Amino acid sequence: MLKQTLLQQMPEAQLSEEVTLLQKKFHGFLNEEGAIRIIASKHGIQPEKKPFTLKKISQLVPGETASFNCILLNCQSVRVFEKDGRKGFVTNATVADETGELTLVLWGKDAFSLRKFERNSFLLVKNAFVKEKEAHSKLVTEILQGQENPAFPKSLVKSIPLTNANGLLNFDAFGRVLEKSPAKEFNVKGKPGKLVKAQVADDSGQSNVVFWNSNADELARFVVGDAVKLEGAYEKDGEIHLGKDGRVISPVKHSLEKREELYAKHFPRLNISQAKEGEQCIISAEITKALSLNAFYKCTCGKKPLTKQCECGKTANETLVLNAEIEDASVSTKCAFFNENAMLVLGIKEASIDYNTLFSLKRDYLTHNVVTFIALPKFSSFTKKMELSAKHVLSIKSQYEMPKVN
Ligand SMILES: [Zn+2]
């Protein structure tokens, strides 16, 4: 087939000469067909791809590579594992068509491909490796938007308002992240675990949500104010949990109120002079002077080392703090921005240079920026002023184009 296409472009003698030359170059380890494929590709001729045929799930045979349309019934969060010292990713999903269901096991970067598909989305799985009641992704696998098919069975798991979760063992819900705590690590019978608690709010109110293990990692992709969809959550003792059979994703669409409206409902908008000790509020103020940028270290052993490397051998947790003088129409005071909030004000995604250099590069550009944030006021007995720490930066209006680093 390829040979015929090539012969339309060159005489047969020339082709056979080129084939012989190539075979010589490969010291005889190349057959005629292989040589023709190389020559064809030089001439911009691609071998015709076999048209892929779509199968039904019940027709899949273990050992084959196959493509099929299906509906996404269930999906776990992406798990990180380590093998031979290297990080790997995997996720399991249950998919079905009208003839049956199977577990889709997605490895590596394919594990993330289901993030953009909510429960009951139609999928086209191309070139997956079929095993007993499973289909695994491999190098050539693609997960695409599939064709809608009313014959496919739908998941009966319901989306409910957050405050209606009482006693439910499996449900979906939409909400905005109102607040989240730092990750807590623990050990159960020698197995390390992790959890993050967050406040999630929808129009019905707000709930405590516990994100376990891989879901704690997934939540790290979202900042306060972001809309999330919880899939496969359960309620226990007044809290919503997202365990190994659940996941948190960015909703494709939602009808949640805008983040500004949500904040205004939960926190009063105040002048600095109206701020009261310990009462969170929304403050808009201008940075009049950037004072310092420092990092503090705290190790899980309890020590506070001067660098990341603790003398106990472990790596200490780093807290980045940006101190600034701020001012609104009422008064001026000091404000501290921590970690991701400091990064936001500095206009960086990660600090790849040392903090002294970073600060000297950025400090002058911070002046006159107007920052709106959720503030936690605290009276300083030292300055005799109400000082603020920024819990969450909501917006920054810059006066200048910031110089780019990293
Ligand atoms: Zn230590």
Image (tube, grey):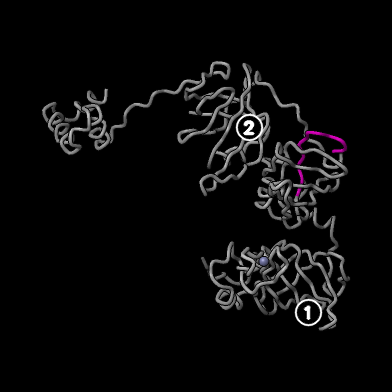
Q: Ligand 1: give its quadrant.
A: bottom right
The picture places residue 381, in percent across and down from the top left corner, at: 85, 81
Whether residue 175 is in magenta: the answer is yes
The reply, left or right, for residue 261 in relation to residue 31 is right
Secondary element under disc 1, as helix, strand or loop, is strand
Tell me what residue is drawn at x 77 percent, y 70 percent. 389
In the picture, the disc for residue 332 is 1
Dot 2 or dot 1, earlier in sequence: 2
The image shows residue 184, relative to residue 157, as above or below, that is below
The picture places residue 58, in percent across and down from the top left corner, at: 58, 16
* Res 282 → quadrant: bottom right
The picture places residue 32, in percent across and down from the top left corner, at: 21, 27
Q: Residues within 10 Å of mark 1 (few under 14, many from 20)?
A: some
Depth check, mark 2 against mark 1: the one in front is: 2
Give the residue type at disc 2.
Ala
Residue 397 makes an appearance in the image:
no
Secondary element under disc 2, as helix, strand or loop, is strand
The picture places residue 204, in percent across and down from the top left corner, at: 85, 44
The image shows residue 246, relative to residue 325, as above or below, that is above
Q: Read off the residue under disc 2.
A: 93
Residue 302 makes an appearance in the image:
yes
User: Where are the magenta residues, as a range?
Assistant: 165-176
As rendered, which of 110 and 154 lies closer to the eye? Answer: 110
